Amino acid sequence: MNALRQSVKGLVDRIERNNRWRQHDCVNLIPSETTPSLLVKLCEIADPSGRYAEHRTMKGSEVYFYQGIDFIRDVEEETREAICTFFGCTQAELRPISGQMANEIVFKAVTKFVNMRDETDFQRMRCVMNNDLGKGGHLSSQPMGALYNYVAPNPATGKENCVNFPVLKDNPYKIDVPRLLELVREHRPDLVIFGKSMFICQEPVRQLFDEVKSWDNRPVIMYDMAHVLGLYGAFQAPLAEGADVITGSTHKTFFGPQRGVIASSMDKGTPFRKAWLEVKSRAFPGSTSNHHLGTLLALLMATYEMNHFKTDFQNQVRANAKAFAHYLVQAGMTVEGDPADGYTETHQVILRTAQYGDGQEIARRLENNNIICNYQALPDDETFLSSSGLRMGVQEMTRYGMKEHHFETLAGFISDVIKTNKNVQPDVSRFRNDFLVQIYCLPMNEIAELGSRILGTILPTSAFAETFIDRLYQIGKTLS
């Protein structure tokens, strides 16, 4: 027992140190992360965590294979309705537990769907169009990622028949639309995948849809919104522009836990209705059994927050990103993107650092000064391992209350570290300590009161619960 206590205490000590460093001392600029609200986190440890609620549609009815799940069944339906409200759509599949899984489910479903239209032997998708990985495309939308095994080989090359979107010569972050439409007419793909991981510009969904909408057997238009899911509508609304399906992870610009989502308006009577039915069947039993019910409950809570604070949060994120880019330029740094767009239309800011050193080394130097971002290969880099840029996102610090003018201070810290290797760690820690309480959620005293009710039902004894809850409540009062 002493050995167990020692191991447990050692781990808790490390957790405490890491929590304090990341949550109190560091400015987090990773564009694919966010810290959920405390209430969302508490939902993750409620009773559904570890339970099962497998279900599928059989003969027109939804059949559940476990008992004791009435509550979580209702939660899943309520989450679906809340997500559909957020996207302004009619269909949502919530069982993917990551954005990559959501993508793979769609790839499986489209492969099955295009085979329904063809009487030949079952085959892979003949051709897929996507963003080049070296131009900011996401790994999961590549043959080496979730697209693996779903695209037929090109007879001329022997490699998967993926055609990358052409980009503008003077701005490799934007698609060359006229050339894109030429390639679509030439290749007649089964699937077109928009969306990126290095993401600062809109994608030409409407232009593509207008080109293909009258085709027989037109391509399915998919938009992987993982990075910009929480900016839906303010940045771009693909479903309103002609996309058939969107996917994403719920923990980047969206306020949720780490899960995936698929959304669409493939209703009865629409051309791709059978494709949506395949999405549902590939979600379960095709890709998941237990779909992490604790995080499903947390997703509902996060979607309440998103639907309420959506407009204010989105506008502030985009304003902060543009301000951050401006202040970095003002500090003498080279920011990628079009100045006419404020360098970015999303939460991301891309910084070119080649003149000061390797991106990986600079990212580590910033980390040593409590500024967390990630190194990034830019479109003219040969490989990811020789990255000449940094990718940064403002969404998490926006939720901790940072406004446009605060990013001037932060840009100064970053410039000092990159240009002169100045030690700004103590200054960054002091700066971060002004931003410890989240906004765009309920006040901390209300979260403490509501959270105590969750904790009170899962803690082992009333005396233990009262002590634990009283401490939480006092913290909540102090922070409010």
Image (spheres, rainbow, N blue to C red):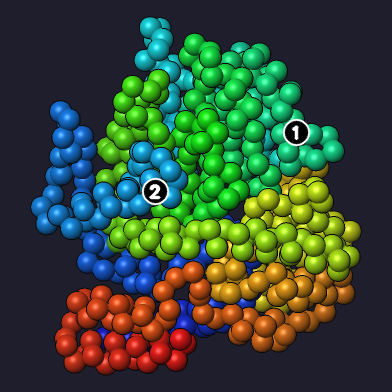
* Quadrant of residue 364 within the rendered picture: bottom right
Residue identifier under label 2: 85
Determine crowd level at label 2: few under 14, some 14-19, many 20+ residues with C-alpha closer than 10 A: few
User: Where residue 315 sits: x, y (%)?
Assistant: 60, 59
Q: Name the quadrant of the N terminus.
A: bottom left
Report the side of 178 relative to 29 (left or right): right
Residue 162 appears anywhere in the view = no
Q: Is residue 58 above or below residue 33?
A: above
Mark 2 element type: helix
Residue identifier under label 1: 167
Q: Which residue sits at x=21%, y=46%?
A: 54
Q: Which residue sits at x=45%, y=45%?
A: 87
Q: Is residue 11 above or below residue 91?
A: below
Q: Which residue sits at x=25%, y=75%?
A: 454
Q: What is the number of callouts on the image?
A: 2
Kind of residue at disc 2:
Thr
Kind of residue at disc 1:
Val
Residue 213 appears anywhere in the view = yes
Q: Is residue 62 above or below residue 433?
A: above
Task: Judge by depth and name the residue closer to the eye, 403 or 114.
Answer: 403
Q: Is residue 13 above or below residue 143?
A: below
First in residue order: circle 2 vs circle 1: 2
Mark 1 element type: strand
Report the side of 418 relative to 237 (left or right): right
User: Where residue 131 sits: x, y (%)?
Assistant: 64, 35
User: Where residue 445 sits: x, y (%)?
Assistant: 38, 84
Q: Which residue sits at x=60%, y=32%?
A: 205
* Quadrant of residue 318 within the rendered picture: bottom right
> What whole-number distance in Å separates the C-alpha atoms at marks 2 and 1?
34 Å
User: Where residue 407 sits: x, y (%)?
Assistant: 72, 71
